[in-house]
Image (spheres, coloured by chain):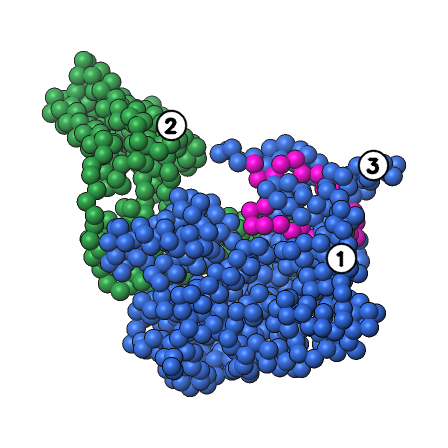
Chain colours: A green, B blue
Amino acid sequence: MTSRTGTTALSAARAGVAAIWCGTLMAAALTIDHPVGLFALLAAVIWAGWLAGAGQQLRKASRFALPLALMVVGVNAIVSRDGITVIARLGEIPVLGRLDITLEGLVYGAVLGLRVVLVSLAAVLFTAVVDQDELLGLVRRRSGRFGLAASVAGRLMPLLAADGARMAEARRAVPKTLAVSRFDLVSSIATGALDRAADAAAALELRGLGEGPCLAPRAHRPWSRHDFGLLISSMACCAVVTAALIGGWVDFQSASSIRAAWGLGLAMTVVVLPLVLVAPLFERRGVGG
Amino acid sequence: MERRVAIELTDFSYKHPDSSRKALDGINLSIREGEFVVIAGESGAGKSTLVRAIAGLAPAFDGGTAAGSIVVCGLNTRDNGPAGIARVCGTVLQDPERQVVMNTVRAELALPLESRGNSDASTARGVEEVALLLGIGDLLDRRLQDLSGGELQRVSIAAALAVRPAVLLLDEPTSQLDPVAADDLAWSLRRLNEEQGITVVVAEQRLERLLPAADRVLALADGAIACDAGPEEFLRWGSAGAGSLSTPAARLFVASGLADCPISVKEARASLARQGFTAVSPEPEETLASGSQRSRLVGRFSRKDPGADAALSISGLWDERPDGRAILKGIDLTVEPGEVIALMGRNGAGKSTLLRHAAGLLKPSRGKAAVSGRVAYLSQTPGAYLAGERLGDCVPIELLEEAGLAGLADRHPRDLSGGEVQRAALALVTASGSGVEPPALVLLDEPTRGMDMGNAEGLLARISYHASQGAAVVVATHDPELAAAAAQRTVLMGEGTLLVDARSVDVLTGGWYFATETARILDGAGGALLPQQGADLLAAAGVGR
C-alpha cells in the first residue's frame, strides 16, 4: 500500500471524502450490469487516473487485471449452464460432463471480467491518490486495535514487495546452476511474511501504538472546495445510477438469452456518469501541484 | 546532586528461543539520567539483544526466556510492554526499513505524537521541531519508500525523538550513514545529551565518532559486561586485550608505543604536537585529478584504448527515472582486471545504482556498461541471497566449507549473524568451478555494514584473493578505512557524477570527511592512511617507539 502526493482534488481533499468517492465508483461498478455502462465507468477511472498522474500505476495494474479478466471469461464460458445460443460443442468431459459454450455464458463472463478490471483499477486509483496515512489515522481514532491491525497489514505489503524485489534481483546475480528455484523464492517470501508482520508490529509498539485507543482531540478543519466537490460528485453519481436502475436504462440480462436496454436513457447515463465523476478533478486551485 | 537512575538491570539474563546459550548473562547495570553510554562489542556479543531487552522487545516480542529485571525510568519491562516503555524511551533499531510504519515522513513523525493523544497543533509543532533538529525538513512530504537507507535512518531517529523521550536507545545508528551524515548524527546526539539532558545509550561497531561524547563505554563479550569504564580507560583496556574494540587513533598510538590513547582526532593531534611532530600536508591540487582529467591523461600518455582489456568499461552512462530525476549523469569508468577500486560518496550519490548497472540489473537510459566476463554482485542485503529453510539448501556444502561455515549448514539463514550471512552470500556469488566460470568482476555494496573488525579483515582477505585471481573488484563503501586497506583507486561520487577518480592515497588523505582517521590526525602527511603506516611515519620522524 502506498500513498501519493498527486495534483488533483483527490489528493487535496480529506482522505475520508476521497475514499468515499473511490468507494462510490466501485459500488457503481458492482451495481450496473450493462456493458456500455461499465465501459463508461472504465472511461471515468482511466480519465481520473490520468488527471491524477496515476496513469503509470493503472497501466501496471492492467497487466494483472486483464489476464485475470480473460480467465474469468474463460471459466464462466465453461461452467455456465445457462444460454440457448450454442457456439461450440466440446463434447463429454470427465467430471464436468457435457460442455457447450453458449453466447450468453460468454457475454456474462465478459461482463464479469469487465467488472474485475474496473474494480481492480478503481482500487489502484484509491491506493495511488488517497492519503493512506490520514485514512489509517481516522480508523485509529475510531478503534485503536483495529487501527493497529490495519497499520500492520498496510505496512506488510510494501515490506514483502521489497523483499521479493531484492530476492529476485539476488537470484539474477547468482550463477544459474546455483540459483534457487522460483518456487523456493516465493516460498521464502511467504514464510518471511510472519517475520515481517512481527517487525511491523514491533515498530508500531515502539511508536506507542499498543497503548490503547488514540483519543487525540482533533482541530476543526474547514471543508475545502475539493471536499465539497468530491462529495457532490459522489452523491450525483449515486443519483444517476439510482435513476438509471429505476428507469431501466441500464437493464441487461444474459441468463437464458441476451437482452439489453438501448435508448436515450442509456445514452444519457453513459455520457453523464463519467462527467459527473471526473468534473471535480478539473478544479486545480489549491491542489498544491 | 546525585542524578536519578534512568536504566537499571539487575541480574538480567536472556536466552533466544531454541538456543542453549545465554545471549545476555547476569547483567547488572545502572545508567544515570543524562549519561551518554556507548555499548561496544564484537558481532554476536549481545549489543543488539541488550538494546532490545531495554526497549521491552526481548522477550515480549522476540520470545525466549529472561531472568532478572529491567527498569527504565521507573517502568519495569515485565509489567510494561514495548509500547509502555516507549512512553519514556525512544528506540531506533538496526534496520531502518523495518521500523518505519507509515507512508510519508510527516505521518511517520506525527504517529508517536498522535498515539499519545497530542492535539493537532502540538503534533504539527513537534514534527516541525524534530525535523529541524535532524535536518530532514526537506524530506517531510516525501514517501518513505523513495528514501535512501541513510535518509530512512534519520527519519527513524527523528520519530523516536518526536515525543521528547527521557532515554534514547540506538542500535548501530551510523551503519547506513555516509561519513558526513554520521558526523552530523554524532553531533546531534551530543547536543541532545548536553542541552536537553536526554540519556543516550548507543550500541555501535565504529566507536571513533561517539567516544568523544561518551561518559561511559560498556564492552560486552559473550553476553556479559567485560569492561565498564570511561572512554580513555576503555581504550587502554581495548588496546591491551581485545584489539578489535579500539579506534584507528588508539591503534596508531599503540603501534607507535605512545602512552594515553586519544579519544578524538583533536586530542591525538595535540598529543603529537606535544611530542614535537609537525605534519606537512600535501597540496590537494598536486594529487587529485577529476574523473574527466584522468581520462585525458590516460589518453595522452598511452596509445592503448583504456577500455580495450578492461574488466568493466562504463561509458556515458545515464540513469533517468520516469519522474525526471537523473540518478547517474554520464558516468565514464574503467576498471582493469586485478584492480580493486573503492566507490565513495554521500547517501544518494548513485553508488548502488552504478553497481547495479555494472551487474546488468538495470537498463541505462543512455550509454553502456560492458563487462569482460561473469559478474559477481553482492548487494547491501546479503540475506536476500539465502532464500531457503536451511543454509545448506541455499549454498552448496563445498562453498560453505571454503567459507568456514560448514557447521552451520542446518541453521536457518535468519538465525545467522550478519557476518555469517555476508560470508555465505559472498561465497555463493563468487563461486566458480563445476561449469561456473570464475568472476571477472566482483561488485560489493557496503560489505562492512555492521561488521566487526575481525569479519572486516576476513573480507579484506577475500577481496585480495579475487584480485589476485585476476578479477576486478569494485567496493561501494562509506568506510574510509576499508577503502584505504583494500583499494588502489578511490572514486568519489556526488549527485550522480564522478567527482574524483584517483589513487586512494590521494583521495583519502586530503579531505575532512572522506579521509581515514589516521590521515586526519597526521594531516595527510606522508600519505599514511592506516595506523601502521602512520606509526612508521611517526617513527621516521622520531616520535614514539
Q: Which labelled disc corresponds to residue B281?
A: 1
> Which quadrant holds the C terminus of chain A?
top left
Residue B256, quarter of picture: bottom right
Q: Main secondary structure of the magenta part?
A: strand
CA separation in Å, label 2 and label 1: 59 Å
Q: Left or right: where does residue B306 sit relative to residue A11?
A: right
Q: Residues within 10 Å of mark 2 (few under 14, many from 20)?
A: some
CA separation in Å, label 1 and label 3: 30 Å
Q: Earlier in the sequence, mark 1 or mark 3?
A: 1
Name the kind of residue labelled 3 in the image: Gly
Would you name the residue on which mark 3 appears? B299
Q: Which labelled disc corresponds to residue A247?
A: none
Instruction: Estimate the x, y position of residue B236 in percent, counting from the top left.
Output: 63, 80
Would you name the residue on which mark 2 appears? A50
CA separation in Å, label 2 and label 3: 50 Å
- Which residues make up the magenta segment? B326-349
Q: Left or right: where does residue B90 sit relative to residue B49?
A: left
Between B312 and A137, the one lying in front of the other is: A137
Up the image or down, B44 lies above or below A256; here it is below
The answer to whether tags 1 and 3 share a subunit is: yes
